[in-house]
Image (spheres, rainbow, N blue to C red):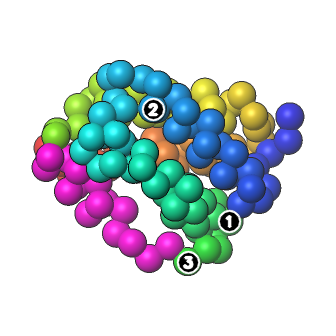
Amino acid sequence: MTDIETREDIALIMRKFYEKLLNDDSINFFFTKLTKVSEHLEEHFDILATFWEQSLFLKGGYSNNMFQIHKEVHYKHNFTKEHFDTWIKHLHTTIDAHFKGKIAEQMKTNALSMATVMQIKFQ
């Protein structure tokens, strides 16, 4: 297995990751009912790829407030520890199934850090 190297690698992770999220009844309602992300996945994948490119490779052009976006969703339906745990589990298993290396580990670390900060801020 190779490490994450390109935007296309990130896009692959996001597509496989969202397959898991959308098939998991414990969390999919965030994407299908509360935000309707499932209705415009390609656009969402592009935004996510830009976000992760910036996070991992220090390039991109992500300018949205990721925390505010998720806080607004949290106000519609509280994120629980179980929701965060499920999100992290699916992301980590997706990354591990396709990539191995420093950047793959960094993506998992960054995701865990973001989830932890959100849990603290959204209490």
Examine the image and state in which quarter residue 61 appears: bottom right
Secondary structure state at the residue bearing disc 3: loop
Identify the residue position indicated by label 3 in the image. Answer: 61
Front residue of 87/118: it is 87
Residue at left 23%, top 32%? 80
Please state, as top left, top right, bottom left or bottom right, where the N terminus lies in the image.
Answer: top right
Front residue of 39/67: it is 39
* Three-letter code, disc 3: Gly
The majority secondary structure of the magenta stretch comes to: helix
For residue 83, above or below residue 35? above
Identify the residue position indicated by label 1 in the image. Answer: 57
**Mark 3 to mark 1: distance in Å?**
11 Å
Magenta stretch? Answer: 62-76
Q: Residue furthest top?
A: 25
**Mark 1 to mark 2: distance in Å?**
27 Å
State left or right for residue 83 relative to residue 113: left
Residue at left 75%, top 34%? 98
